[in-house]
């Protein structure tokens, strides 16, 4: 299906990026995986990805039969992104598909939020993704067409208690995606978003996220991580029509691979979701 086409996946060190990189490899793509692979923001309360995580994605991509190139890059730095894409072009001869997926998430009520928490989420999730698109789009134009897929969120489809910075960044990405789809269609480039629900990754499996889920249900977390995890899981199970607490990254990856495919050539400016049924709670 990929027939040697070249995909760049950002946030490839783990989670949704890793699962998608492996799915692309299985589909016959050559894969460049980009990640900061270090602490992206001191405002985050969860473990950062490491260079070893990125290397592990590479191992899995190669095991799946794909060629692999790792690039360590902070997507806030446009010059560094330009350099990273130059390395991809040098290695693989061009770029056909970009999965702009890297992101961070933190929680704080507006009344208590630090400047750092707001800016890091907007700078990485929204501006960083725009940086990737602005560097990649001319390369796709040069190639005669291509695919751009970005990762938004259900939190880019509704408000989020104690998550205004993240929500704003993910709503902003929908505006970016739709605008880019309008502008780039004439070059044979489609632009779409994937909407992951609550996915079982490091970004969600920590006390702050459990506490936010519990508060969203009108209750207070106990601060006991294991107990709050069980309460959050139960709340999710009740909320999701498909009855799971978390959705797996591997459940998102097929949407990404489809949106990158030749078969999706007439799909642009829209969103595809894998949410365990939570999409039934939003209008889009
Ligand atoms: P993850 O496991 O934390 O993966 C995200 C990756 O992006 C990490 O390796 C992270 O590196 C990297 N990254 C962060 N800042 C970066 C930067 N400035 N430049 C380059 N790479 C950077 O989380 P995930 O759940 O797979 O998330 C992937 C995407 O899905 C994110 O955009 C997230 O917002 C979105 N999403 C996730 C969920 C969910 O429930 N998990 C739901 C909806 C949307 P460090 O860890 O080293 O910072």
Image (cartoon, rainbow, N blue to C red):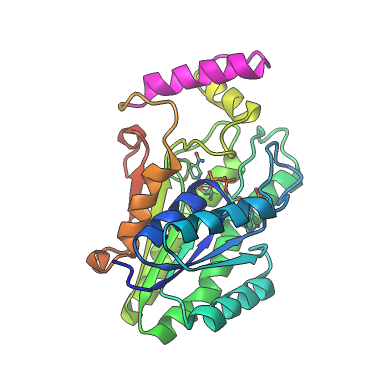
Residue 183 position, x and y percent, is 39, 75
Q: Nearer the viewer, residue 159 or 269?
A: 269
Residue 88 position, x and y percent, is 55, 76
Could you tell me if residue 269 is visible in this image?
no
Residue at position x 34%, y 61% in the image:
27
Residue at position x 52%, y 46% in the image:
15
**Which corner quadrant holds the N terminus?**
bottom left
Question: Where 193 falls versus 199 (above or below)?
Answer: below
Q: Nearer the viewer, residue 268 or 69?
A: 69
Res. 223 image quadrant: top right
Q: Is residue 42 left or right of residue 271?
A: right
Is residue 51 found inside the magenta-colored segment of the image?
no
Number of residue marks: 0
**Which corner quadrant holds the C terminus?**
top left
Could you tell me if residue 74 is visible in this image?
yes
Question: Where 15 falls versus 149 (above or below)?
Answer: above
Q: Is residue 137 left or right of residue 182?
A: right
Residue 246 position, x and y percent, is 44, 31
Residue 141 position, x and y percent, is 41, 83
Q: Nearer the viewer, residue 21 or 142?
A: 21
Question: Where 6 falls versus 226 (above or below)?
Answer: below
Magenta residues, dominant SS class: helix
Is residue 232 found inside the magenta-colored segment of the image?
yes
Q: Nearer the viewer, residue 181 or 52?
A: 52
Residue at position x 35%, y 58% in the image:
257
Q: Which residues are magenta?
A: 218-240
């Amino acid at each position: 299906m990929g027939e040697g086409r070249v995909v760049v996946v950002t946030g490839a060190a783990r989670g949704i990026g890793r699962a998608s990189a492996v799915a692309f490899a299985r589909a016959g793509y050559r894969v460049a995986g980009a990640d900061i692979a270090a602490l992206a923001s001191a405002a985050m309360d969860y473990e950062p990805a490491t260079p070893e995580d990125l290397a592990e994605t590479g191992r899995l991509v190669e095991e799946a039969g794909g060629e692999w190139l790792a690039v360590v890059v902070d997507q806030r730095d446009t010059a560094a992104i330009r350099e990273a894409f130059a390395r991809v072009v040098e290695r693989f001869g061009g770029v056909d598909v970009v999965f702009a997926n890297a992101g961070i998430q933190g929680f704080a009520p507006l009344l208590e939020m630090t400047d750092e928490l707001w800016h890091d989420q907007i700078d990485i999730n929204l501006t960083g993704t725009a940086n990737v698109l602005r560097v990649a789009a001319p390369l796709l134009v040069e190639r005669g067409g291509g695919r751009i897929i970005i990762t938004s969120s259900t939190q880019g489809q509704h408000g989020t208690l104690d998550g205004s910075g993240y929500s704003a960044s993910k709503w902003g990405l929908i505006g970016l995606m739709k605008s880019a789809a309008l502008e780039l269609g004439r070059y044979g480039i489609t632009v779409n978003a994937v909407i992951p629900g609550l996915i079982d990754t490091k970004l969600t499996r920590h006390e702050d996220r459990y506490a936010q889920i519990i508060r969203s249900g009108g209750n207070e977390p106990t601060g006991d991580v294991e107990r709050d995890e069980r309460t959050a899981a139960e709340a999710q199970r009740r909320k999701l029509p498909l009855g799971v607490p978390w959705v797996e990254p591997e459940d998102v990856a097929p949407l990404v691979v489809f949106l990158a495919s030749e078969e999706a050539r007439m799909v642009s400016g829209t969103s595809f979701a894998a949410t365990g049924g939570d999409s039934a709670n939003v209008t889009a």
